[in-house]
Amino acid sequence: MEKLNDLIKKVRFYSSIFLHRETPWLVKILLGTGLLYILFPLDFLPDSLPFIGVVDDITIASLIIALALKLVPPEIYEKMRGKYFP
């Protein structure tokens, strides 16, 4: 149950960054791309390959989201982080 709560907090955290009016458009595009890739992966490696097919989807989406978070202005990041992870 704790893992589900952590996941919900992270989703809200990313959503609040995405919806913040001062978040740069590039960050919004990257976060949207990461979300779309999770929902509709292009499958560089087919999911029929055991383990590897799923891991590539998670890895690529994680890298896209990590890049987006690096580009968020520090004041927005800290404000949202303090709101969801006190």
Image (cartoon, grey):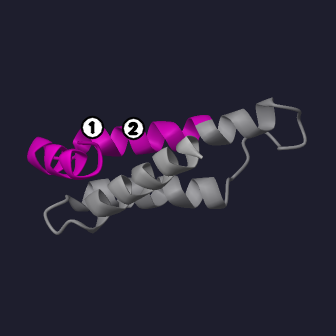
Query: Is 4 positioned to the left or the right of 81 in the image?
Result: right
> In the image, is residue 15 above or below residue 63?
below
Query: Is 57 positioned to the left or the right of 9 in the image?
Result: right
Name the spot of residue 21 as percent of width and height, x first: 16, 69
User: In the depicted view, which residue is nearer to us: 21 or 46?
Assistant: 21
Q: Is there a contact, CB below 8 Å, between mark 2 and mark 1?
A: yes
User: In the depicted view, which residue is nearer to us: 2 or 56?
Assistant: 2
> In the image, is residue 84 above or below residue 74?
below
Residue at the location (56% across, 49% down)?
A: 4
Q: Which residue, given by chain and number where applicable, does mark 2 sit on?
A: 66
Residue at the location (44% across, 61% down)?
A: 32
Question: What span is in magenta?
Answer: 59-86
Membership of 12 in magenta stretch: no
Name the spot of residue 22 as percent of width and height, x first: 13, 63
Name the spot of residue 45 as percent of width and height, x first: 78, 38
Q: Secondary structure at mark 1?
A: helix
**Type of residue at label 1?**
Lys
Residue at the location (67% across, 60% down)?
A: 40
Query: Is 80 positioned to the left or the right of 59 in the image?
Result: left
Q: Residues within 10 Å of mark 2 (few under 14, many from 20)?
A: some
Q: Which residue, given by chain and number where applicable, does mark 1 sit on?
A: 70
**Type of residue at label 2?**
Ala
